Image (spheres, helix red, strand yellow):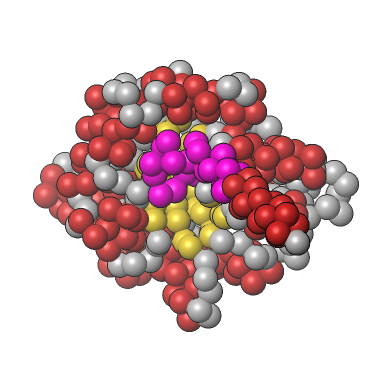
Amino acid sequence: MYKVFMKLIRRVILIIALFCFSLLGNNDIENNLQLNRVGLWVVRYSMINKKEIDQFIDCAKDNGITDLFVQIRGRGDAFYNSDLVKKNKNISPHSFDPLKYACNVAHNNNLKIHAWFNTYILLSNSKIENYSDHLFKLFPNWTETNYNGQSDFELVYSKNTPKHYEGAYLSPIHPDVNRYLFLLIKEIITKYDIDGIHFDYVRFQGKNWGFNKKGMEIFTKKTGLKSEDFAVNGKYYRNDSLRNAFFEKYSEYRIQSINELIKRVSNYNKQNNNEIEISAAVKPNPILAKNNYYQNWLSWIKNDWVDFVVPMNYTQKNQTFNNILSEIKNSLDKDEYNKVLIGIGIWKQSPKNASYKINLVKEQNLTGVVLFSYNTLKNKVNYYKEMVKNVGKN
């Protein structure tokens, strides 16, 4: 009887030891990073079928990832089953719901899923989607217009696009655009068991953009100011004080148009007691983000409209990277540091260089990082482990 009892005790001890060892193994890489959160952006082409999704889930498990940012809206299409948006044609089988499947598998593996939502961008180049009911074609008056009066609907078909042209955008100042986008986000929040909604391209293309005709008419009704009076050869063009005052007001108008969407989603989330985090991928320098792209993400944090932001600090230069970290921290109160995860562009640098940047994030006592993107880990299977080897060795 005693031998049977001791044998049973040894078996229990062995089971406990194996369990503890398995926990240690699963969390070893995460503990080495010594960060509360380690995120990974997953581009939409890894959301087309079960096999691809299973692969990035396994990658996340193996590498200590805590949060997956899966792209479910690319260029005006859907990588989920929507009543409002046409599903991407590459999903196979076409009845497959990538977001639903990703949520189920991720949650079974204690991973968080954030629905990565490309907000205002519609097309990234001159290739027009094959189907005729793309939003770009249905509502061309919703698209952006630059300072010279050129609309994105015209520029996409043009061979002479402006320098650094990113593609066709929806205009945040057109009143129907934010209403439409809110309906899309509401559908995702209500239909799917997501852990977060993650905005991307939630900005203007640059300082020379934001002159959608309908949006400008609304601005004129509100202020009595006409943009043509301050354009080249306009009656106030050479009056610096009046022109500067106009653009200051117009800049604030553009900022508020984006704030309106973020605030509305936030209010909806709170009113319905949704346990969903709201986040955004943002331009890394908060001053330039506000002044050049009308993306005032500091106000989103301070007004509690977002749970966190991810500044896309993709530079390869370590000193520049650290300068931006300092700029971010200097703009925040200490209790707001946990509302920032730092985006690192691993596709354009070595594992050692990426680890150096992770060390800088840790030294600044910030919460975590988000890596762009899964494609690098997929194509370079040892990248993450090589990166981890150098964490803590600066």
Q: How many marks?
A: 0
Q: Is residue 239 magenta?
A: no
Direction left: furthest residue: 241
The residue at the point 41 percent across, 20 percent down is 352
Q: In x, y percent, where is residue 81?
A: 76, 59
Give how far across and how far down residue 142 sits, in percent. 56, 55
Q: Main secondary structure of the magenta part?
A: helix
Q: Nearer the viewer, residue 297 or 319?
A: 319
Q: Is residue 322 above or below residue 153?
A: above
The reply, left or right, for residue 95 in relation to residue 11 is right
The structure residue drawn at horizontal position 54% and vertical position 23%, both measured from the top left corner, is 383
Q: Is residue 3 above or below residue 126?
A: below
The answer to whether residue 154 is visible is no
**Residue 3 coordinates in the image, percent (x, y):** 73, 54
Question: As rendered, which of 229 and 99 lies closer to the eye?
Answer: 99
- x and y percentages locating residue 312 in the rendered image: 40, 38
- Quadrant in which the C terminus is drawn: top left
In the displayed structure image, the side of residue 180 where residue 231 appears, left or right: left
Q: Is residue 32 magenta?
A: yes
**Which residues are drawn in magenta?**
20-40
* Residue sitting farthest toward the bottom: 271
Q: Residue at x 21, y 39 (%)?
A: 326
Name the quadrant containing residue 189: bottom right
Is residue 166 depicted above or below 280 in this figure? above
The residue depicted at 58 percent of the width and 26 percent of the height is: 376
- Asked if residue 290 can be seen in this view, the reply is yes
Left or right for 355, reference 125: left
In the rendered image, the quadrant that contains the N terminus is bottom right
